[in-house]
Amino acid sequence: MSLRINAVVPDFEAETSQGPIRFHDWIGDSWAILFSHPKDFTPVCTTEFGAVARLSAEWKKRGTKVIGVSVDGVEDHKRWAGDIKTAGGSEVDFPIIADDELTVSKLYDMLPQDAYLPDGRTPADSATVRSVFIIGPDKQLKLSMTYPMSVGRNFAEILRALDALQTTAQHSVATPADWTVGQDVIIPTSVSDADAKQKYGDYETVLPYLRKTPLR
């Protein structure tokens, strides 16, 4: 299946490094980030897991659960966690899904339905399992991005995008390019000037269809 923004993400049951889960139940009323990897004990992925672990307090501050998925088994995940701590300097306090049967990778359209893991496989056999999915409490997909194996993900950008998603959901606004918390937001074009004045107070009209205002 192809995943689209605002579609409900597939539910599934899986074994993880922290025990079994049912995905929608695990999300509960939180925001969630699912980030995937083609293999344990690989250099770029190890640095990425370390980056996510170091941001533990930031995810919690935003009411967001994070969960990794890698196309290996639970015991490999548990052993890999030691390497991640060595390289990244923080404990891995989030679960890692064991997707050695490719269930999640196929459900989330990262691999074709006829994909399989050959004997003696390398990360290249599951190279497209390199995505990030930000999911709302309504279980709908809010954002996704996919990277090649050679390029480490920028989790500062993922954190920034999460802030923007939560802000726009809470305040019914939009955010401009490169927006960060504290900067002006964009008033939706569906809001008339009169309603904008009543709802947002003073605002700046850059163009007839581009109006900016501070969050109050």
Image: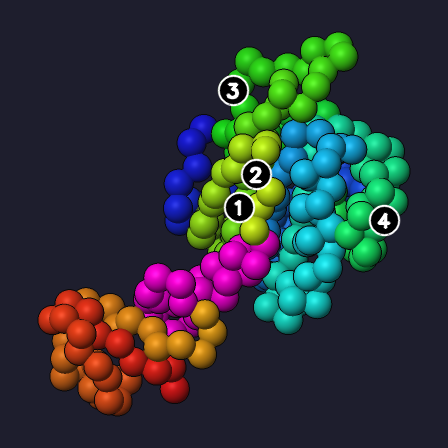
Nearest the viewer among 205 and 73 is: 205
Question: Which of the marked residues, 3 or 4, is nearer the chain's N terminus?
Answer: 4
Report the residue marked by disc 4: 86
Report the residue marked by disc 1: 133
Report the residue marked by disc 2: 151
* Label number found at residue 25: none
Question: Which of the marked residues, 4 or 2, is nearer the chain's N terminus?
Answer: 4
Left or right of residue 96, residue 114 in this image = left
Span of residues in magenta: 155-179
Determine the CA span between mark 4 and mark 1: 26 Å
Report the residue marked by disc 3: 112
Outermost top residue: 119
Question: Which of the marked residues, 2 or 1, is nearer the chain's N terminus?
Answer: 1
Determine the CA span between mark 3 and mark 4: 34 Å
Quick one: SS at disc 4? helix
Residue at the (78%, 52%) spot, across then down: 88
Can you say which quadrant of the picture contains the C terminus? Answer: bottom left
Instruction: Decide: few, some or many residues near mark 4? Use Cα within 10 Å; few <14, some 14-19, many ≥20.
Output: few
Determine the CA span between mark 3 and mark 1: 18 Å
- Kind of residue indicated by mark 3: Pro
Question: Which of the marked residues, 4 or 1, is nearer the chain's N terminus?
Answer: 4
Q: Reply above or below: 62 against 105.
A: below
Nearest the viewer among 193 and 131 is: 131
